[in-house]
Image (cartoon, grey):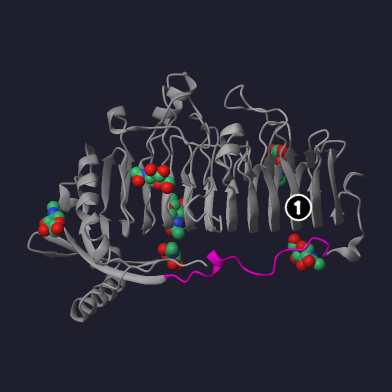
Amino acid sequence: MLHFEARKEAQLPKKVARIAIVLVLVAFVLGPRGAEGRKKGKVVESFAYTAISCGGHSASITDFGGVGDGKTSNTKAFKDAVDNLSKYASKGGAQLYVPAGKWVTGSFSLTSHFTLFLHKNAVLLASQDMKEWPVLKPLPSYGRGRDAAGGRFTSLIFGTNLTDVIVTGANGTIDGQGSFWWQKFHNGKLKYTRPYLIEFMYSDNIQISNVTLVNSPSWNVHPVYSSNILIQGITIIAPVKSPNTDGINPGMNTRTQSYSCTNVRIEDCYIVSGDDCIAVKSGWDEYGISFGMPTKHLLIRRLTCISPYSAAIALGSEMSGGIQDVRAEDITAIHTESAVRIKTARGRGGFVKDIYVKRMSLHTMKWVFWMTGNYKQHPDNHYDPNALPVIQGINYRDIVADNVSMAARLEGIEGDPFTQICISNVTIGMAAKEKKVPWTCTDVEGITSGVSPPPCDLLPDQGSEKITACDFPAEPLPIDKVVLRRCSYRVKHM
Ligand SMILES: *[C@@H]1O[C@H](CO)[C@@H](O)[C@H](O)[C@H]1NC(C)=O
Ligand SMILES: *[C@@H]1O[C@H](CO)[C@@H](O)[C@H](O)[C@H]1NC(C)=O
Ligand SMILES: *[C@@H]1O[C@H](CO)[C@@H](O)[C@H](O)[C@H]1NC(C)=O
Ligand SMILES: *[C@@H]1O[C@H](CO)[C@@H](O)[C@H](O)[C@H]1NC(C)=O
Ligand SMILES: *[C@@H]1O[C@H](CO)[C@@H](O)[C@H](O)[C@H]1NC(C)=O
Ligand SMILES: *[C@@H]1O[C@H](CO)[C@@H](O)[C@H](O)[C@H]1NC(C)=O
């Protein structure tokens, strides 16, 4: 059973609540600045959001000495604020308000029953002082860092072993100032793996919504070994040539081992990036196999993606713990290399099973469908070449694409074919300079119906009367049933 632990009701006294409502109304009438009133040298602001739970106590980063001048480091202010507000975890939770301004900060950790709220003109600027980025051990399921053999810099916003944490705002910005890191990466100057913008490990009941993430040093959002995650209304922007700036990379779950599911819902996101818009992962070769925890029950909907050198949705290549039950719908991709790509290799082990993708609208793609069993990056030479991945039950339907160079490039593994592929009701408009053979298929098995241009012989056409051949699950995922609440507050700050 899925249950978002609701924060204990710590409702504002009725009178205060009424004043807050009045302030919201005034804000509505007077425009964006209307909610700000001066009181004893302080600004009073009201704010509201929808969330998995509402918090009780509110404080502003300025209460803890924060300065939003774009220069002063606020790392200590954020640490002090989170330390202070962690005391409210058992008393209804707390929220930290970040007013308009440019707030330079290094890495800081969040606490349970906690909300970080960014004003629409608040910008968190990632510090470029390496001392502000503590180093963590590599992830157990990876065995090493992605950029270097050793540890990894802690993410800008980090949390481990938490429950009920929200990062939200009126579309405020988190700016990774990534060029500093991309240069070090290109010059081979990194001793440790680059930090992400937001990472949660071993955590439960997480919401990340209505914020804009720009120029991440590397991946943008990385929930790992975590469950019950809602990601909604996120804008992610990075230069399309920046290295490894994947949008959202849900990793695998360990917390709820009894039913071993992640329950991740990603919706209404707009992502422009230098790597996959969404990359689903679950560990790397022998480390992922022995860690043995799959990523499961993932819902992706209403995603718009631009990623000229990568995919809208990638499964793998690190999939050694297994990936199962991924549902994606209403995906728009523009100028993106492929819509869905499944990447694996000998040595990975694990599986990618029960993938359901429907209603994609695609414009200017190299390959609509791409699968490869020959994605050779390995963490080290100790992988087992006999550890073969199982790729099975891959379903695509109701897809329209135009200006496509090649409809599909599907390459399984010799002696380990990718099976139960089902593709139906797909119309692919080829580019003027299309490749001569629109489909290439090796070591794959499956069926198609109502697909044009006509698929390869390994995926025989069943005829369009069998257009419902690909069966999609009818029962919604538990994460889809989560109801959000409206939370509104006011806060006084300098
Ligand atoms: C995000 O913002 C939109 C538009 O303001 C709003 O409708 C939605 O409820 C918000 N979602 C969350 C989870 O805050
Ligand atoms: C931290 O929390 C305590 C309550 O435990 C409060 O009295 C104090 O003023 C807080 N500190 C700041 C700087 O807000
Ligand atoms: C977090 O949880 C994991 C898995 O249960 C555990 O191994 C680790 O020691 C915990 N870390 C902290 C900081 O409590
Ligand atoms: C949020 O901000 C980004 C960047 O400025 C913008 O592209 C996007 O449209 C905004 N989203 C909303 C819902 O206002
Ligand atoms: C085929 O897909 C298109 C959208 O891509 C959709 O409008 C249509 O209803 C689908 N046809 C069937 C029979 O499902
Ligand atoms: C079609 O795709 C090519 C790249 O393959 C691109 O240069 C061209 O602008 C696209 N045309 C349209 C109409 O989008």
Q: Residue at x 29, y 66 (%)?
A: 55
Residue 197: image location, x then y, percent: 41, 42
Question: How many numbered markers are drawn?
Answer: 1
Image-based side of 464 in relation to 247, left or right: right
Residue 3: image location, x then y, percent: 46, 67
Q: Report whether the residue tagged 1 is closer than 8 Å to ligand 5.
A: no
Q: Quadrant of residue 371?
A: top right
For the C terminus, the quadrant is: bottom left
Q: Residue at x 43, y 66 (%)?
A: 4
Q: Quadrant of residue 411?
A: top right
Looking at the image, is 6 positioned above or below residue 376? Answer: below
Residue 348: image location, x then y, percent: 66, 35
Q: Amino acid at mark 1?
A: Gly
Image-based side of 401 in relation to 204, left or right: right
Q: Residue at x 88, y 48 (%)?
A: 459
Q: Main secondary structure of the magenta part?
A: loop
Residue 174 visible, this orientation: no
Residue 102 visible, this orientation: yes
Range covered by the magenta-colored residues:
468-484
Q: Residue at x 23, y 80 (%)?
A: 18
Mark 1, Cα crowd under 10 Å, few <14 / some 14-19 / many 20+, is: many
Image-based side of 183 in relation to 9, left or right: right
Q: Residue furthest left?
A: 40
Image-based side of 68 in relation to 133, left or right: left
Instruction: Report helix, strand or loop for mark 1.
Output: strand
Looking at the image, is 82 positioned above or below residue 108? Answer: below
Identify residue for label 1. 393
* Residue 473 included in the magenta stretch of the image: yes
Q: Which residue is nearer to you in this view: 16 or 402?
A: 16
